[in-house]
Image (cartoon, helix red, strand yellow):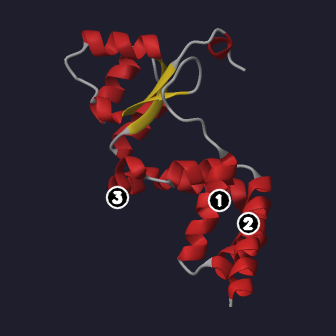
Amino acid sequence: MRNSEKTGESFITIQATPAQAQRLLELGAISESQARHASEAGGLMVRLPAHLVNEFRNNEPVSLPDSLITLAATGGTQSQPFDEELELDKMADWFHRAGLNSAARLFFATNRPLSFFGSQFLLALQPLTRTAFGLNDPTGRWSKLLEKRSNLDRLVYKLERLAQQQRGKK
């Protein structure tokens, strides 16, 4: 646990434009590699202490639209906590409704050792998917789920259970 999380300091996750990322670099809030990534990707999701974001908003001519700011993590936030079980249920239901149940079970079962790399690949795709899906983009949530191999086992189990339920209805 980080010191700032122990003290209950709240954090804000922002979608910074390349210009905002450059200014955050000048302020020492992000690293040079993060600023370079923001420039290449057309933006960057950054998690910063709330007091830094508030200072930036008050002192800078470049505004951060409220629609792109999401409160996150510790101390009195308005965002909903990440519920792995609920997200796994949504993911399994999505594959099942799309008719990809068998293919998804086979894919996840055979590629279980590569789950972490898959999660990182999804993060790399996030600038593109966020453009397509906007703030409803599931890529970040799915990436977080794939980081743990045990979640793949749980997902495959849920998919098997949905397939059994469907067979029982026929």
Instruction: Give the label on residue 39, or none.
Output: none
Q: Earlier in the sequence, mark 2 or mark 3?
A: 3
Q: Quadrant of the C terminus?
A: bottom right
Q: Earlier in the sequence, mark 3 or mark 1?
A: 1
Name the residue rendered at 27%, 10% in the picture.
Answer: 58
**Gap between marks 3 and 1, in whole Å?**
23 Å
Name the residue rendered at 67%, 54% in the picture.
Answer: 146
**Residue 89 x %, y %:** 65, 59
**Residue 97 x %, y %:** 55, 75
In this figure, which residue is indicated by the disc labeled 2? 158
Which amino acid is tagged 3?
A: Ala
- Between circles 2 and 3, the one closer to the viewer is 2
**Gap between marks 2 and 3, in whole Å?**
28 Å
Name the residue rendered at 60%, 62% in the picture.
Answer: 91
**Gap between marks 1 and 2, in whole Å?**
7 Å
Instruction: Give the total of numbered labels.
Output: 3
Name the residue rendered at 32%, 21% in the picture.
Answer: 23
Instruction: Give the label on residue 89, or none.
Output: 1
In this figure, which residue is indicated by the disc labeled 3? 132
Residue 117 versus residue 35: which sits nearer the camera?
Answer: 117
- Between circles 3 and 1, the one closer to the viewer is 1
